[in-house]
Image (cartoon, rainbow, N blue to C red):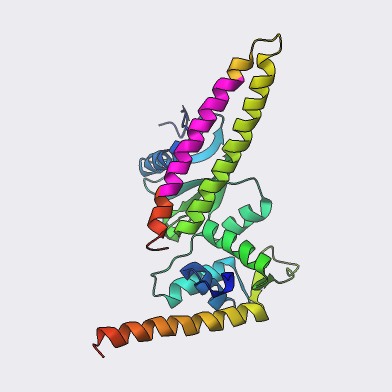
Amino acid sequence: MASRRTIYKWFWVWDFEKEEEWLNEMAMNGWVLESVGFCSYHFIRCEPGEYSVRLEMHPYDESYVSFMEETGAEYVGRMMMWIYFRKKTADGPFDLFSDIDSRISHLDKIGKFLTIVGGANLSIGLFNSFSPSRLGWVNLLCATLLMYALGRIHGKKESLEKERLLHE
Amino acid sequence: MADSLALTEATYYILLSLVSPRHGYGIMQLTEELSGGRVRLAAGTLYGALNALCAKGWIIQLPAEDDSRRKEYKLTATGLKVLNKEVARLRELADNGEKILRGE
C-alpha cells in the first residue's frame, strides 16, 4: 500500500475553516499532511486520528514557529501567507485560538492582506486599462474577487463581534 | 480609560501565571491546572497576548539562557498593580452575585 499521496485541491480564502476540516478528515482516515505546495497537499500514512492539523494566516516568523514547537506542535509548512501545523492527538487538544478576540484579530489579519493585494490589483488594473496592453481586465477581475473575499471575511468577523457582546 | 476595563480570562490567567517567571508552555500548563481544566490557552492566542502585554509594559521578556531557545516572561510592577485591581474587581462581582442570589 502506498505510503504517500498528493492531492490537488483549491480552497477559497474564506473557506479556510473548511480546508482545516478537510485536512483533519484526511488525518482521521490515516493520511496526515506532510508538506504543502500551491494548491497541492502532500500526505503520508499515519494511524487514523493520530494527528490534528491547524492552519492560520501568519507571516513567517521563526520565533512564532519555535514557540509553537515548544508547545508540542510540529511545523508542517507554509504556502503564501498560510502556515500549517500538526500535533499528535495523544499530546492533548490542539487549537490555535481559544477566545473570540484572537479569532477576530486573525480575521483582521486576513482582511488586511486581502485589502493590500486587492488594492494593488485595482491600481494595476486601472493603470493597464489606459495602456496599450489591454490586459487591465485581468487585474480588475482579481480585484473584484479579492473584494468579494474581503466581504466574506468581514461577515465572519461581524458574527464573532455579535457573540462578543455577550461573552468573550 | 483602557485601564479601568475588565481583563479577558486569558489575560488574567497569563498575568497570574507570570507572578513567577515562566515560559509559554508553562503558562498554558499552569492556567489549565488552576482552572481545573476549564481554561485552555491556545498557542496562537497566547503568543498574541504575550506580545501585546509586553508592548503594554505589564510583562517583560527575560534574557534567554544560553542553552535554551525558550523565552521566559515575568510580570512587571505595573502588571502586578493591574492584576491586584482585577482581583478586587472580580471579588466585587462574586460578592454581589452571592449576596443577591442568597436573597439578602
Residue A19 picture location, percent across and down: 44, 38
Task: Tell me the residue at 62%/52% (across/down).
Answer: A65
Left or right of residue B69, residue A72 in this image = left
Would you place residue A33 above or below residue A147 in this image? below
- Answer above or below: position of B101 versus A160: below
Instruction: Confirm whether residue A146 shows in the render.
Output: yes
The residue furthest left is B103
**For residue B63, which quarter of the picture?**
bottom right
Q: Position of residue B10 (x, y in %)?
A: 49, 68
From the viewer's side, name the closer residue of A7 and A39.
A39
Q: Tell me the residue at 64%/13% (across/down).
A: A135
Tell me what residue is drawn at x 46 percent, y 53 percent. A88
Left or right of B10, for residue A47: left
Residue B20 shows in this picture: no
Does A138 lie within the magenta span? no
Q: Determine the residue positioned at 47% across, 37% down.
A: A151
Residue A84 vs residue B51, the one in the foreground:
B51
* Residue that extends furthest to the bottom in the rendered view of this protein: B104
| Quadrant in which residue A100 is drawn | bottom left
Task: Give the quarter of the figure containing the N terminus of chain A.
Answer: top left
Left or right of B47 in this view: B99: left
Magenta-highlighted residues: A139-158
Q: Residue furthest front?
A: B1
Pinpoint residue A93: horizontal percent, then vertical percent: 42, 58
- The overriding secondary structure of the stretch rendered in magenta is helix
